[in-house]
Image (cartoon, rainbow, N blue to C red):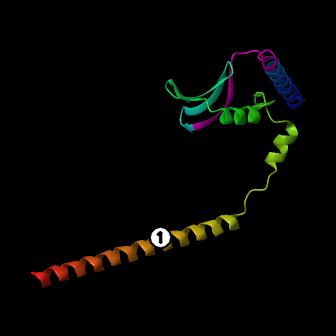
Amino acid sequence: MIVFYLALIIGLFLVIIRLIAKRNRLSLPGRIVRTLGGAPLGRDKSVQVVEIAGAYYILGVGESIQLVAKIENPDELDAIRQMTQGSEPTARSFPTMAQWWARRKEVRKPAEEWSEFDQIFQDRMKTMKDSRRSVSELLEQEQSREERKDTIHE
């Protein structure tokens, strides 16, 4: 019985979060600044593309926010507009129970695949080591030839 009530409370909590997120999305369509996307570059650092009053900017975000570039090329502007047309950013939502269960049931890679990868990795590392050794041997041979030439000319 306790498990049922716990599941009920968690379910209500998730429904409330979704309703709040949906209401926030609907109340923001007339905003001036719109984030079109971004890419993380490291810990607490990213690059963001934003639209401000019809103009597109690339911003570097870290300890401070810096303007990287203003996109002024009409072809680039059209390409960005086509990519983002009709795609308002949506709030990330919690996975449904079915999605969670499906992910939970995903088959993990068997140990054989990992051992195969490990074998390929070890083979590549050995090949690199051998090639590095042969390059160093060639360099040593070339150096000894140069030394012999120098002794002959003296």
Residue 133 vertical placement versus 51 (above, below):
below
Percent x, y for residue 25? 79, 20
User: How far from the left and from the top, in percent, is residue 16?
Assistant: 83, 20
Q: Which residues are magenta?
A: 24-40
Residue 15: quadrant of the picture: top right
Residue found at the far left of this picture: 154
Q: Position of residue 119 (x, y in %)?
A: 59, 71
As drawn, 69 above or below 20: below
Examine the rendered structure and indicate whether residue 31 appears above or below residue 140: above
Residue 81 relative to residue 118: left or right: right
Residue in the picture at 59% in, 37% down: 40
* Quadrant in which the C terminus is drawn: bottom left
Closer-to-camera residue (61/146): 146
**Label 1 crowd (10 A; few <14 / some 14-19 / many >=20):** few
Residue sitting farthest toward the front: 74
Residue type at tag 1? Met
Quarter occupied by the N terminus: top right
On whether residue 139 falls in the magenta region, the answer is no
Residue 72 image-quadrant placement: top right
Judged left or right of residue 100, residue 137 is: left
Residue name at image x 78 percent, y 31 percent: 85
Residue ID for mark 1: 128
Left or right: 47 in relation to 85: left
- Secondary-structure class at tag 1: helix
Q: What x and y, as percent, mark residue 110?
A: 72, 63
